[in-house]
Image: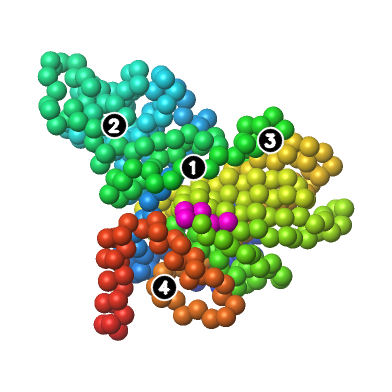
Amino acid sequence: MSEAVDLQDARTAPALVWQQLDRLKGEALLEWRMAPIANGRSAQERNIDGLPMPFGWFALCYSDELGVGEVKPLRYFERELVLWRGEDGTPRLLDAYCPHLGAHMGYGGKVDGQHLQCPFHSWRWDGEGRAVDIPYSKSIPPRMKRPACERSYPTAEVNGFVWAWWHPQHVAPLYELRTFEEVGHPDWTDYETHEWIVHGPMQALAENGADSAHFKYVHGVVDNPDYDIRYEGHRRTAEVRVRMGTPRGLVDGAIAYGVDGAGQPWTRFTGICETLLVTGVTPIARDVTHLRFAFTQLKADRDGPNRGVAKAVIRDICKQLDQDKVIWDRQAYIDQAPLCAGDGPINDFRNFFRQFYEGAEWDKYREAARQRTASH
Ligand code: FES
Ligand SMILES: [Fe+2]
């Protein structure tokens, strides 16, 4: 049994899990971050199965992972998807199964101009899911000529990521993505990227920032500064002043943190080592989440005398994520959790996050939860 699998073993006491995690380095650590769970439990057993997937803008890949004319199979939103970049440079996303006879267009599909050519019978599809050409037929079935919002997804490209808008009822985008001027700026470094597959729902990851008590027990943070969290529409922001130990002694700094919608968190460190963390959180399924961290730092810090601190900032954030993942991978969802003083503003957070659940799906989930509680 490899060390990566040992780490997944729920019989290991958490403290030991984290000690072992500390020793994981390089390839073994990367493998652990993405590995399937050896003895994971079903979404149903963990009370996640009925929890809706939130709607919003979600990262699909980095821009430089999708060249002009490239086709990619993806799995997000509990669907098979195909992403391509047309000759015009625009990324487009469709359900992968061709509506003609069901070929998976992510495997063998080709780009033709702006369109996607199916590998099976060469029908050409546009980004709105319309058949635009059948090479061996003069006519196209009328219903294939209409845009199909149920199997096409609005896309956007900002901050070096390709994004898609997903909504269970195919409602058009309700807010815009945030853009950061640091990304691609000549004074800022290229992204340093890290990624994880977390075996838990989007909500559990997002809730972490509001969960004050865990910082001590999971991350060993003794004085967790109180974040003053603000909620405005689809945005959640917080700012905190911190004092950090550096090779130059204690330095005053600030951490600003926010989330736009359910899928676009970001964190900005100022004062100590200027760092921007652009995050993409994307549901693969309601109980599996893909998380990407992309760091950019001021070149003057990253390449200057602050170099050690610059690297430590990134290392510490990733380490915290590893520590959280140990919990998230096996956590059950507790609806109407019995919170106590000191738990932090978890209920405020849940009320905020609920706006990203489509109304009917949320009502269905709450009704099922109510019945479960009543039958106990
Ligand atoms: S299955 Fe795609 S063109 Fe026939
Ligand atoms: Fe955490």
Mark 3–mark 1 distance (CA, rounded to whole Å) = 22 Å
Mark 3–mark 4 distance (CA, rounded to whole Å) = 41 Å
The number of discs equals: 4
Q: Residues within 10 Å of mark 2 (few under 14, many from 20)?
A: some
Mark 4–mark 2 distance (CA, rounded to whole Å) = 39 Å
Residue 337: percent from left, percent from top:
44, 76
Residue 175 painted magenta: no
Question: Disc 3 marks which amino acid?
Answer: Thr
Question: Disc 2 marks which amino acid?
Answer: Glu
Nearest the eye: 333 or 108: 333
- Residue for badge 2: 128
Question: Disc 4 marks which amino acid?
Answer: Ile
Mark closest to the chain's N terminus, 1 or 4: 1
Nearest the eye: 352 or 30: 352
- Residue for badge 3: 189
Q: Residue at x 52, y 30 (%)?
A: 64
Helix or strand or loop: what does disc 1 sit on?
Answer: loop
Residue 248: percent from left, percent from top:
87, 53
Nearest the eye: 318 or 246: 246
- Residue for badge 1: 177
Tell whether label 2 touches label 3 (CB within 8 Å): no
